[in-house]
Structure formats: C-alpha cells, structure tokens
Amino acid sequence: MRRITGLAIAAIGLLGAAEAPIAFPDGFRDWTHVTTAVAGPLDPAAAKKYEGVHHVYANAAARDGYRTGRFADGAVIVYDQWTAVRLGADGIAAGERKFIDVMVRDSRRYAATDGWGYTEFAWPDRHRVTAIEENPQGCAGCHKSAPGDDRVFSTLRE
C-alpha cells in the first residue's frame, strides 16, 4: 500500500510538472547566437511590437535543429527584442530591452500547437505574459507560416 501511494504521488507530481509554465531561460545569452536583425517601422513583421533590434539564441538542442532541419524535444529558442536607437545619420544600435519570447519544443506537451510552447517575458521585471500562454494558437498561427515544417522563422548564421 505504501509503495502504491508513493507511486501515485510521484505520478501526480509528474503531471503537475508537465503543466508547469515555461521557465525564464536563465543564461540564454551564453547559448548559440543564431542571428540579429533590425525591423523598421515599415517592416510588415514589425507591427510596432517587433520594431527594433532583435537577437535570436538557441540552446544546444535547438542549435542541432537549425543544423539538421529537425528540432527535437528539449529545443529552446529565445527571441530577445530591444528598441532601436539612432546613431548619427545612418547608424542603429540596441537601446532598451522590451521583452523576450521563448519557444520550447515538446511534442507531447504542446501537441495542439505543432509541438511548440510559447511564452513571453516582459521587461524590466521579467514577468511572464500569461495571455500568450492562455492563447497559444496566436503564436502557433503565425509560426505556421514559417518555411519548412518546424515553425521556426530564423536561420542559423554560422
């Protein structure tokens, strides 16, 4: 009886862990830098929210996915969005961080959104934007338009 109870408690713990929110990816700037881009106000992808400078980072599993074209469970991609600051007549630099978006590959947990989970952390307090997690189809709907089958827009720049 005691063993069954212990197993039941462990199973409940695992179910709770599977439903846990996406954690802030501490140390992501030490991961592989995938690419950097600037979206200006006329860029259709900018839609004001994404206007500015962004950097994309990949953990080891995501880096392998970029190289092979298939992202395995455990892949994490971070989209680090900053404001753009003009430097003189033709220079642009990153200003203030606006937010980071995080994609997590888990084909079982996120089966309804093609195997990817999405969240956003607003800046400067790093709070999770729960509205994104409450409507994951919003992110997934856009990512369906990414080229290929893995719903990823960026390309690794070796």
Image (cartoon, rainbow, N blue to C red):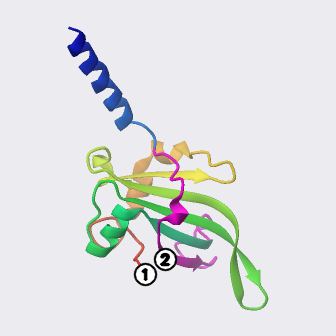
Image x and y of residue 83, in percent: 68, 69
What residue is drawn where x is 29% and y is 63%? 71
> For the magenta stretch, what is the residue range?
22-51
Residue sitting farthest toward the top: 1
Location of residue 140 by image quarter: bottom left
Compared across the picture, whether 92 is left or right of 13 comes to: right
Residue sitting farthest toward the right: 88
Seen from the viewer's position, the closer of residues 91 and 146 is 91
Seen from the viewer's position, the closer of residues 120 and 43 is 120
What residue is drawn where x is 44% and y is 52%? 118
User: Residue 35 shows which numbered tag?
Assistant: 2
Seen from the viewer's position, the closer of residues 42 and 152 is 152
Q: Quadrant of the N terminus?
A: top left
The residue that label 1 is drawn on is 157
Location of residue 149 by image quarter: bottom left
Looking at the rendered structure, the kind of residue marked 1 is: Arg
**Few, some or many C-alpha atoms within 10 Å of disc 2 (few <14, some 14-19, many ≥20)?**
some
- Whether the residues at callouts 2 and 1 have beta carbons within 8 Å, the answer is yes
Looking at the rendered structure, the kind of residue marked 2 is: Thr
User: Residue 126 shows which numbered tag?
Assistant: none
Tag 1 secondary structure = loop
Earlier in the chain: of badge 2 and badge 1, it is 2
Tag 2 secondary structure = strand
